[in-house]
Image (cartoon, rainbow, N blue to C red):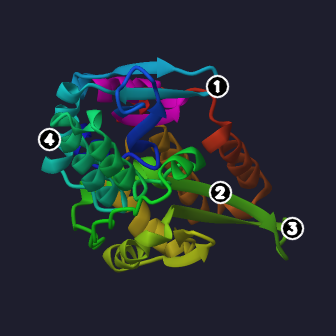
Amino acid sequence: MICNRIFRRWVASHCFLISISKDNKFKTGWRVKHYFAIHIHKKDQALLEKINNFFNVGKIYVNKDDFIQYLVFSVKKLQVIRKHFEDYPLHTRKRADFELWIKAFELIQNKEHLTAPGIQKIVAIKASLNLGIPDELKAAFPTIVPVERPNVENIINPDPHWLAGFTSAEGSFFIHIYKANTKLGVAVKLIFKLDQHVRDEQLFKDLVKYLGCGKIYFDREVVVYWVTKYSDILEKIIPFFKKYPIIGVKALDFNDFSQVAELMKDNKHLTQQGLDQIRKIKTSMNQGRKSFDLQASH
């Protein structure tokens, strides 16, 4: 089912959010908004519409840039979102964000956000949620102590559908063509990559064991899992995602990635004709992809 593969983990694109802004219409002087958002590229609009239809709450908003948003606001409608992620738990640091978000949600349900003590509690929760609180709130609530983030054990669940959904949101499939001492003067490398905040280091260590391949490295506050060994990609990564399909625009990138892997298997990348074909495929992948047919990803 699409819901179990995608909704359990959409990436870096879905967020559990709390907005706190000045508003003199409220006795506390502050207005609190509690909502759920998915922010993705417009190429995946058809998929976002499927998500909207699945939850049957919220709306899709088209931005002026190349992105679209799915937003859910009201307490009643957010109950649908809450139930889903309680039934299908998250695994990365987003699970801690979700648990904090629920704490604020329950305060709002009890109308505590309309009181000064309640605002204090919500600010303390927001301070530990996502990227924390902006400077305006820090200045307005200088004595606030952020609540402790839940200790989430990021041990990967051996659920292949979860990993397919995780990759649909966070994964990247690259074709790297670089200068090399070969007959054609270049070589071709396939790269499969996932990245997360460093707080998810253990998750990626477990992923290396789970897939039986790949390595992790760090780039400032980001931990990266990647696979570059051709035999691992051909024998482990590609068969896994063919058995447990990726959904969305990433599925098209995966199809192109797999096509290049087959060309390399036949040593076509060592010929000028094959290299030209690979270059053409590479050009239309990732940011070079101009359109998206949802049916092609099924």
Specify which label sits upstream in the sequence, 1 or 3: 1
**Residue 292 in view, yes or no:** no
Which mark is on residue 175? 2
Q: Is residue 105 magenta?
A: no
Task: Identify the amino acid type marked 4.
Answer: Lys
Q: Nearer the viewer, mark 1 or mark 3?
A: 1
Q: Which residue, given by chain and number where applicable, does mark 1 sit on?
A: 65
Q: Which residue, given by chain and number where applicable, does mark 3 sit on?
A: 185
Which quarter of the figure is the C terminus placed in? top left
Find the magenta span and give its range: 34-52
64 or 28, which lies in front? 28
Specify which label sits upstream in the sequence, 4 or 3: 4
Which mark is on residue 225? none
Task: Describe residue 82's horizontal placement relative to residue 168 as left or right.
Answer: left
Looking at the rendered structure, the secondary structure element under dot 4 is helix
The alpha-carbon separation of the residues under discs 1 and 3 comes to 39 Å
Q: Residue at x 50, y 51 (%)?
A: 133
Looking at the rendered structure, the secondary structure element under dot 1 is loop
Answer with the quarter of the image where residue 213 lies.
bottom left
Task: Identify the amino acid type marked 2.
Answer: Ile
The alpha-carbon separation of the residues under discs 1 and 2 comes to 27 Å
Residue 133 position (above or below residue 184): above
Q: Which residue, given by chain and number where applicable, does mark 4 sit on?
A: 83
Residue 179 percent coordinates (x, y): 84, 68
Q: Nearer the viewer, mark 4 or mark 1?
A: 4
Q: Is residue 38 magenta?
A: yes
The alpha-carbon separation of the residues under discs 3 and 2 comes to 16 Å
Residues under numbered marks 3 and 2 in contact, where contact means CB atoms less than 8 Å apart: no
